[in-house]
Image (cartoon, rainbow, N blue to C red):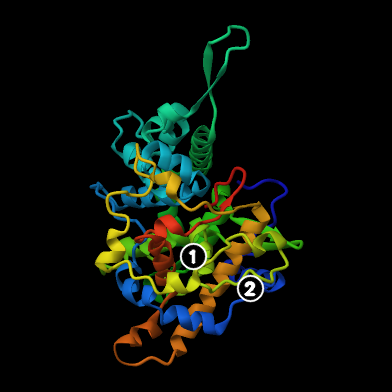
Amino acid sequence: MSSPSSPALPPKGSIITSIRTSCSETRVSANIQVDEESIKTLLQSRIFKSTFKHLRLAHGLAMPLQFPSITSEVNLISLLSILNFAHGYRVPLKKATGRGAYDTIRVLLFGMYLSHDDEGLMSAKGLKNISKAKVAELMNLTNYIHLERPHPSIPGLTIGELGGPLYELVDLVTGVLNQTEEILVNAGYSDLGEFVIAALRKGQKDEQPGVSDAEVVLDEIIRTFPAFQDVGTFEGKPIYIFKKALFLLHALVLRFGQEGDRRIPLPDTDELPIFSDNVIPSMLVHFGVLDLSATTVPTLRDAFQPVAVTANLDYDPTTSKGSDEIKGKEEGSKGSDGYQQMAVGPQLSEQEAYVLRAAAIDACEMIVRMAKVLDVTGEDVWIQSLTLPELDGWLWSVAKEGRLRRDLSRFRQGGRCVMY
């Protein structure tokens, strides 16, 4: 989370511009190449054409729950967004429960929502009182947060103590929830959903009823909650990413913007930057869009080698052959060795990760610009209407398709991280 040494946030009214400018400057300074031909090849590839239409909106937001009010549902989506991290714990989570990071957070929130706790775990008071033990229980991790070590004085006896990567994850999640409660209570809000709706209404555009200014909403959310302050540095300059805040806005649009029901004002998210995590930059490397071979960050040059770009672009997971490749040996299923078959990606420092995430944001801007002018005809004209959130949804979701979920490595950032 944010610390006194963290880079300053952008000036008011400049968050979206600052994301684009800082990420473009970072990619150029790091000499990460994006070639126009590589973009055209991706847009005309078999993997893109065969999967884009059914994966473009797949952001994992389906909620099998009934909500008593719109505030209650916005609250769950907001908590899902602020807790949308834990990428570095993917392998131990798969080994323990068979779930990845995002699905583990969903399980936690479903459990919190259905809890019969007197205060209600989703409220600000509930977030204050939630403990590490309760978080571990709801994440189904109670049996995986201890380490065993030999007793210091009794031979043959082992003792257990709290520790290990999944205990670290539980500690991070509990810390974000407790911090969020403190901020909400001090500001007079009963839950995070109430705060977000107030931010949406503050951004209401007078000339466009039902439409909220994304810049205003992002400003309110990011400046209030350190867990949304996703900022790094490279060569002494800030890199603005704000993945979770951007994800939150688009999640609300996907849920409430398709019904013609404007009970809450919503921003237009079609032109917002992508929500850059570890998956999307990694996929852009595997698809040949991000060329790291000459980057000025030496550790990134061979981080993903070897990369089978042609084979990846020519892969079609919708065919029976493609979909059957991993049938019967689901990646990471509990009690199996699936997690051991997952390709191991590079571990990056915080700065290296920010550079790669920034390059992905700039590359996606270039992909969408290229798509709009791409020379296509007939059944491929839909490519020209590609939007940034759709591209984000596709890149994030296609990584889970067929052999790609097993064979294509994703980087992970070392150390404690609550930004993605």
Of residues 401 and 230, which is closer to you in this image?
401
Kindly identify which residue carries mark 2: 24
Per the rendering, the mark at residue 283 is 1
As helix, strand or loop, the secondary structure at mark 1 comes to helix
Position of residue 271 relative to residue 376, above or below, is: above
Q: Residue furthest top?
A: 154
Q: Which residue is drawn at 55% across and 47% down?
A: 418
Please, what secondary structure does the residue beneath circle 2 have?
Answer: helix
**At 53% across and 42% down in the image, what residue appears?**
183
Percent position (x, y) of residue 417? 58, 46
**Residue 190 circle label:** none
Residue 295: tell me if it is visible.
yes
| The one of 301 and 16 positioned closer to us in this rendering | 301
Q: Which amino acid does label 1 sit on?
A: Met
Give whichever of 125, 115 is nearer the camera.
Answer: 115
Residue 253 location (% of width, % of height): 36, 64
Q: Which of marks 2 and 1 is nearer the N terminus?
A: 2
Query: Would residue 16 be visible to someone looking at this image?
Result: no
Q: Which of marks 2 and 1 is in front?
A: 1
What amino acid does circle 2 point to?
Answer: Ser
